Structure formats: C-alpha cells, structure tokens
Amino acid sequence: MGEETRARILVVEDDPEAALFLVHVLANRCRFEVIHTADPATALQLAADEHWDLVVTDLDLPGMTGLELLGALRQVAPALPVAVVSARVLDGVPAGLLAHADHYLEKPLRLDRLIETATALIGRGRPLSDDLPRGNLRAWL
C-alpha cells in the first residue's frame, strides 16, 4: 500500500526530437508514466489493451494520419482524452474531425502550455456520452 498511482500518458510522435522533448517533460518534470511509440497502429493497440489517462499525438504520422488515429481512438477508447500536436495550421481540417480532439498544441511546443494542458486533461478526463460510437479495434487495423 502507499504507492501513489501515476497518470499514464501515451505519446505518439514520429519526430525523434519532439518525442524526446515530450517524454522528458511529461516523465521528468511532471512525474507521469510515459510510453512513446512512433507507430499509430501500435498506439491504437495500446489504447485498446491498456488504461491510459491521456494520449498526446502528432498529426503527421507514417501509415495513418493523426486525424485517422484520433477517429480510431474515439472508437476503441471513447473516454480517453487526446491532445493533438501539430506544426501546421489546422484551418483546412474538417470541423467534425477536429471535434474529436480535446486540445490542440502548436509546434514548437512551449513547456508551460504542455504541462498545463496535460495536467488539465488528466484532471478532468473525457466525459462519456451514450451517443458516442463504440467500435471494434479490428476495423481500424
């Protein structure tokens, strides 16, 4: 008894420098348990199989876009908060897809905004609604 449970964050980022920054800040500064993968299919499998308190994902990923990953995450883990990180302007992205994200962070990432966003999203979670679609992981892999 007595060991405090740390919040778990799944980082999905294919840029090694950005991934290192995210993991370093979230694990060392914030003391979260952080797992990193550059592969969105692996991230989706991890999200379906394990408990996470937050996913932080880039939009530009190999094999599956961050928006595709976001849609798939909403199917397999609808209550999981997701923060999207992007270096590009999000004006051309359909509003319906953007609505699946809980927060957006612009690259280059600012330390204070990252910590503030992660802490807030983990603290409040994602409200579950009965009308959220439930799906099958196999449909996305």
Image: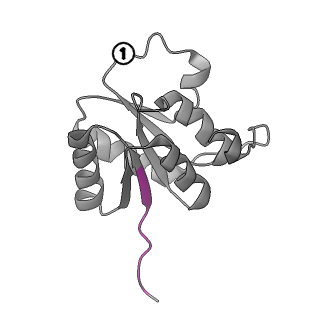
x then y, percent, for residue 134: 75, 43
Q: Secondary structure at mark 1?
A: loop
Name the magenta segment's main secondary structure: loop
Residue at the (59%, 46%) spot, across then down: 126
Looking at the picture, does residue 88 appear above or below residue 108?
Answer: above
Residue marked by disc 1: 89
x then y, percent, for residue 50: 56, 62
Q: Quadrant of residue 133?
A: top right
x then y, percent, for residue 92: 47, 10
Residue at the (35%, 61%) spot, across then down: 32
Residues drawn in magenta: 2-10
Q: Indicate left or right for 37 with 29 as reference.
A: right
Q: Is residue 5 magenta?
A: yes
Residue farthest toward the right in the current orientation of the protein: 130
x then y, percent, for residue 71: 60, 33
Q: Quadrant of the C terminus?
A: top right
Crowdedness of circle 1 by 10 Å Cα count: few (<14), some, many (20+)?
few
The amino acid at mark 1 is Val
Q: Quadrant of residue 99?
A: top right
Looking at the picture, does residue 30 appear above or below residue 70?
Answer: below
Residue at the (51%, 57%) spot, across then down: 52
Q: Is residue 52 magenta?
A: no
